[in-house]
Amino acid sequence: MAKIQINGKKVSIENRASVFDILKKYKLNSTKVAIELNGIIVPRSLQKKKKLKNNDKIEVVQFIGGG
């Protein structure tokens, strides 16, 4: 198990989990969120390839429509 931080909350994840795995776990639609990993935006095309490691910090921002 690895310990990471998601939006300021510490959580445990499976070793070698990807950014996409985290989105799936929390039922987030990858087309409606922006992911920042350790201060760097992760493009949607790399979310399945980008593996997480101990002490990584993820910020998830959801797009909300409005007027």
Image (tube, grey):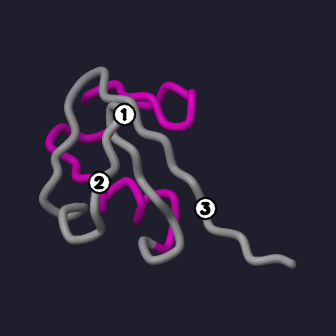
Query: Percent from the top left, x then y, of residue 23?
Result: 42, 60
Query: Percent from the top left, x then y, of residue 10?
Result: 50, 25
Q: Determine whether the residue tagged by mark 3 lies in a helix, strand or loop.
A: strand
Of label 2 and label 3, which has the lower sequence position? 2
Q: Quadrant of residue 61?
A: bottom right
Residue at the disc numbered 2: 42
Residue at the disc numbered 1: 39
Q: Quadrant of residue 30?
A: bottom left
Cα distance between the residues tagged 1 and 2: 9 Å
**What amino acid is at disc 3?**
Gln
**What amino acid is at disc 1?**
Gly
Q: Is residue 47 left or right of residue 27?
A: left
Residue at the disc numbered 3: 62
Residue at 34% from the left image edge and 25% from the top image edge? 3
Total marks shown come to 3
Task: Please rate how many residues cluster around mark 3, counting C-alpha atoms within 10 Å: few if below 14, some from 14 to 19, many from 20.
Answer: some
Magenta-highlighted residues: 1-29
Are the two marked residues, 2 and 3, in contact with CB atoms closer than 8 angstroms? no
Q: Determine whether the residue tagged by mark 1 lies in a helix, strand or loop.
A: loop
Residue at 21% from the left image edge and 71% from the top image edge? 45
Residue 23 shown in magenta:
yes
